[in-house]
Amino acid sequence: MAEPLKLFILAGEPSGDRIAADLVMRLRAKVDVTLSGVGSDELIGQGLRPLFPMSDLAVMGLTDVLLRLPLLLWRIEQTARAIVASNPDIVVLVDAQDFSKRLAKRAKALGFTHPILLYVAPSVWARAPHRAKALAPLFDEVLAVLPFEPAVMTRLEGPSTHYVGHPSLAEGIPTSAGTDRGLVALLPGSRNGELRRHLPLLGQVAAQLAGHPAVSGFFIPTLRSLEARLRAETANLPVPVTIVANRAERRALYQQSVLALSVSGTATLELALARVPMVVVYVLDTPQAREFDRIGRPQVGLPNIVLGRIVTDELITTAPEPDTLKAAALRLLDNKKARQDQIAAFGELADLMERGTEDAPRQDPADRVLGHWQISGR
């Protein structure tokens, strides 16, 4: 009997946890797999016993990172030592870009020689193009979830990069393009800092939209680990908000949605693939705002980035602006054609992501991982 693939996999946040679990399922359809690493609900559902809670890594913005810096530095050392001690066949680090980069560097310094893959390409093309080349010694391959990234990484002399798509491609069931009335999805993020900055804002705007004829109700799709917290924090809102932690129920509610108000990030990609019209919002902390200005205030909504044009409004601010967000929401709620135009653009995005580009066709991430296993001598 063939030896199982010994996989060390690390996800640093909920979107990465989902991507990682999808990869494990794909691998298990082809070979036996033994797991170690770090993750949360999705990877635990695949049998992972996490080295430590994934929530230790789920930070965003310099302020949150500085508050947790001693713990993060220890987790890098602890994880690198665990990798060297267990000597897996393959290491896959999913997103958590700064942590993953430092972890790969430390594991190699401690003598780990098997392949290390990064799943979800870093946004060096927007933030620091000159840094792409420095990633090449750290990662044997990057698995990209956006179709233009392989070409960008090649141009910037970064690691070998292949496009593998996103798990939402298998779930994106379109809503009706003729929906005149439906739910509003509120997506305030999952990290503590994001929830602190966005949940009150989205709750306030929901209260102002409650009487609109196109709005039948509100819901927040979230994680099981955040379900109780969100129920408590939305209990006193002037409008009822349903908290949904079940993924199948979330997909069903997306089909009934007329609009989403979402923080920037992977959630916007999932919404686009489900054909939900949206407004993208993000309230930056002070260090994030300085960095955003430094790099020229680029687009942050993934639908806009992938399609290379403005499809959804992006409201990126340094303080909550409920009136601005309400106005952007009303521009969609009051204009059926504007909603249909977004839905049509999201269909274009789905087609592009399904096939990839001529130079970077979509590949199975499991096949990319197994290729490294075979090369390294399974």
Image (tube, rainbow, N blue to C red):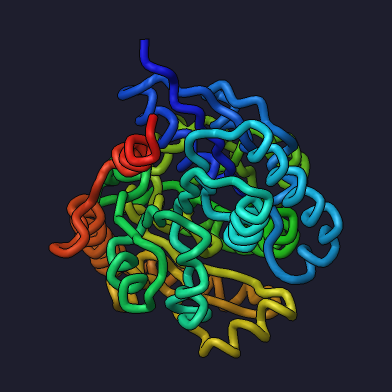
Q: Give how far across and how far down residue 372 sits, in percent.
A: 36, 42
Which residue of the protein is positioned furthest toward the left in this rendering? 358
Which residue of the protein is positioned furthest toward the top in this rendering? 1
**Quarter of the image that includes the C terminus:** top left
Q: Give how far across and how far down residue 238 sits, in percent.
A: 70, 51
Please say whether residue 146 is visible from this viewpoint.
Answer: yes
Question: What residue is drawn where x is 30% and y is 78%?
Answer: 309
Please say whether residue 199 is visible from this viewpoint.
Answer: no
Label tally = 0
Q: Nearer the viewer, residue 369 or 183?
A: 369
Question: What residue is drawn where x is 46% and y is 66%?
Answer: 136
- Residue 235 in which image quadrant: top right
324 versus 271 height, above or below = below
Q: Nearer the viewer, residue 374 or 355?
A: 374
- Residue 70 in which image quadrant: bottom right
Q: Give how far across and how far down residue 226 sits, in percent.
A: 69, 39
155 versus 342 height, above or below = below
15 versus 297 height, above or below = above
Q: Give how far across and how far down residue 48 sits, in percent.
A: 60, 26
Question: What residue is drawn where x is 73% and y is 38%?
Answer: 53
**Quarter of the image that includes the N terminus:** top left
Question: What residue is drawn where x is 46% and y is 50%?
Answer: 117
